[in-house]
Amino acid sequence: MKTNVVTFLIETYQFSLRSARDVSLFFSSTQRHFHRAQNLISAAMHSKKFRTDFLVILLIGSQKHFAIAQNNPNTLPSGGKVVAGSATISQTSNATSATMNVNQTSQRAVINWDSFNVGSNAQVNFNQPNSSAVILNRVSTGASPSVIDGALRANGQVVLVNPNGVTFGKGAQINAAGVVATTMDMANRDFMEGKSTCAGNGKGKVHNKGTISTNDPNGYIALLAPEVRNEGYLLAQKGANNTIAMAAGEQITLDFRGDRLIGCPWISPPTTP
């Protein structure tokens, strides 16, 4: 019986892997077979070996389907909910491309996302009132890092928060008045009041392999995490008012004078004697 249960689960997974284009279809397929699996599982749950095998199969399955979702060139951020300020979200897609437009009408806004991934054929546009407008995008669920392989464009400033990490792939093209990518967070109220201190114990890293550029005379790029790595291009406009900052710590404050980032003081993790 133990062998039958494990074999059934593997076959169910392989079927969905061959036919699914996204994660949702995998879970739908699994649900259709749920009652059959439930009977087999109940007969074998008393076996410790079976429980181990079962967990391993589910873990491998979830990892592979996560990879499929990440490699989908049309992937866009999902589950966006505006929790502060004013903004609307719309998207279009076809077989070869996908576009999301976030139209922000307040000077500051916060959106909580289930995921924030951008495929290689996808583009996310933030249409903001002006270059001083700021939008905080927070991945509030799940345990997966954000992977951006496509384009992200904004005429204002964009903050991306994911405690699990943020990776800009080799094909990523990011262009905005200001860009912050961090594993640390800030409270909605503090952000809406104009404060800019990021804090938290996110375990992910920020890794840039693509191109992140500014389009404003006071533009800035800030990559903030316990581990920050740049293997791509960070491009600021020529001039004294453009700033690039890479910092690691548990609490980091972006120090602005007007729209210009002039400093990035941080508090590093305590050292072990």
Image (cartoon, helix red, strand yellow):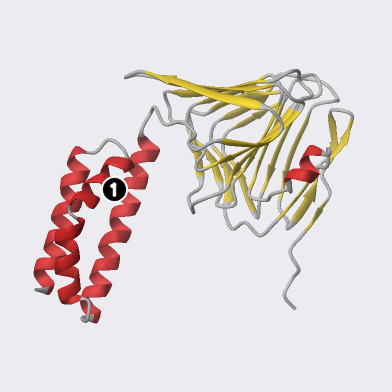
Q: Name the image quarter holding the C terminus.
A: bottom right
Give the class, few, some or many, for how many residues have Cα within 10 Å of label 1's Cα (few <14, many ≥20).
some
Q: Is residue 92 above or below residue 141?
A: above
**Total marks placed:** 1
Q: Nearer the viewer, residue 209 or 87?
A: 87
Position above or below: 242 against 40: above
In percent of the image, x 28 and y 48: which residue is there?
27
What is the quadrant of residue 47 in the picture?
bottom left
The amino acid marked with disc number 1 is Phe
Q: Is residue 102 left or right of residue 28?
A: right
* Residue 12 position within the rendered picture, expressed as x and y whole percent measured from the top left: 16, 52
Q: Position of residue 114 (x, y in %)?
A: 50, 43
x%, y% of residue 197? 79, 47
Left or right, 77 with reference to 18: right
Check the image and name the residue furthest to the front: 35
Q: Residue at x 20, y 45 (%)?
A: 16
Residue 57 is left or right of residue 80, and the answer is left
Q: Residue at x 69, y 19 (%)?
A: 155
Along the line of sight, which residue is nearer the eye, 114 or 269?
114
Q: Quadrant of the N terminus?
A: bottom left
Kind of element beneath mark 1: helix
Find residue 163 and report its horizontal and vertical position in percent: 59, 52
Residue 107 drawn above or below residue 13 = above
User: Residue at label 1?
Assistant: 27
